[in-house]
Amino acid sequence: MRTAWDRVRHALFFEIFGLILVIPLGALVFSMPMHDMGVVGLVSATIAMAWNYVFNLGFDTIMKRSTGTTLKSMRLRIAHAVLFELGLLIVLMPFIAWYLGITLIHALIMDISFALFYMGYAFVFNLAYDRVFPLPEWRRAA
């Protein structure tokens, strides 16, 4: 399993690269000021980093206990990304509505858009991260 330091590195890289992409894209797509998207992005990223650490630790612990490894199949990677984003969606929607002064429906649409973006991004990022920083147990399995 990954170390605490590796999980922190993963979360930081994930959020930094995600913010670089999502703030300008969100401002453009939703016709919102870059500053407002930046605040939403930074608060969301902070919450997401904590969720990322907790979720991935729990997910990997369950995987390790049930299968004996943390090596993820494509199907499991898709389930991982969907479950992560659903949990985050529930937490972030009220904040987005409040901060931007929009309806919960508008915030839901915005949050779903972010979630869809981040699901694809999470899939690609995690695949790349696992290739750049593979665990020793995966090398032995290959």
Image (cartoon, rainbow, N blue to C red):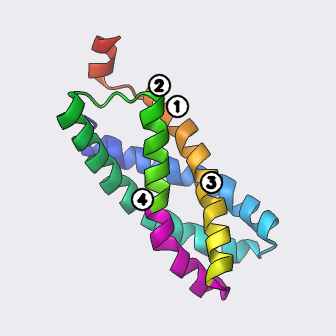
Q: Between marks 3 and 1, how big is the CA–CA gap? A: 19 Å
Which residue is at a point 47% across and 25% down the rendered structure image? 131
Q: Which residue is mark 1?
A: 128
Residue that appears at 42% across and 27% down: 73
Boundaries of the magenta span? 87-103
* Mark found first going from the N terminus, 4 or 2: 4
**Of callouts 4 and 1, the N-terminal one:** 4
Residues marked 3 and 4 touching at CB (< 8 Å): no
At numbered mark 1, what does the secondary structure look like: helix, strand or loop? helix
Query: Residue flagged by tag 1: what amino acid is it?
Result: Ala
Which residue: 34% across, 47% down?
Answer: 56
Pick whichever, 95 or 132, lies toward us.
95
Mark 3 lies on residue: 116
Viewer-proximal residue, 14 or 108?
A: 108
Residue at mark 4 to residue at mark 2: CA–CA distance: 21 Å
Pointer 3 or 4: first along the chain = 4
Going by the numbered disc 2, the residue's amino acid type is Arg
Secondary structure at badge 4 equals: helix
**Residue 77: percent from the left, percent from the top?**
45, 36
Residue 55 spot, x, y in % from top left: 34, 53
**114 is higher (above) or lower (below) than 14:** below
Q: Which residue is mark 4?
A: 49
Question: Mark 3 packing: few (<14 Cα in 10 Å), some, or many (20+)?
Answer: some
The x, y position of residue 2, in whole percent, is: 28, 37
Q: CA distance from mark 4 to mark 1?
A: 18 Å
Callout 3: SS = helix
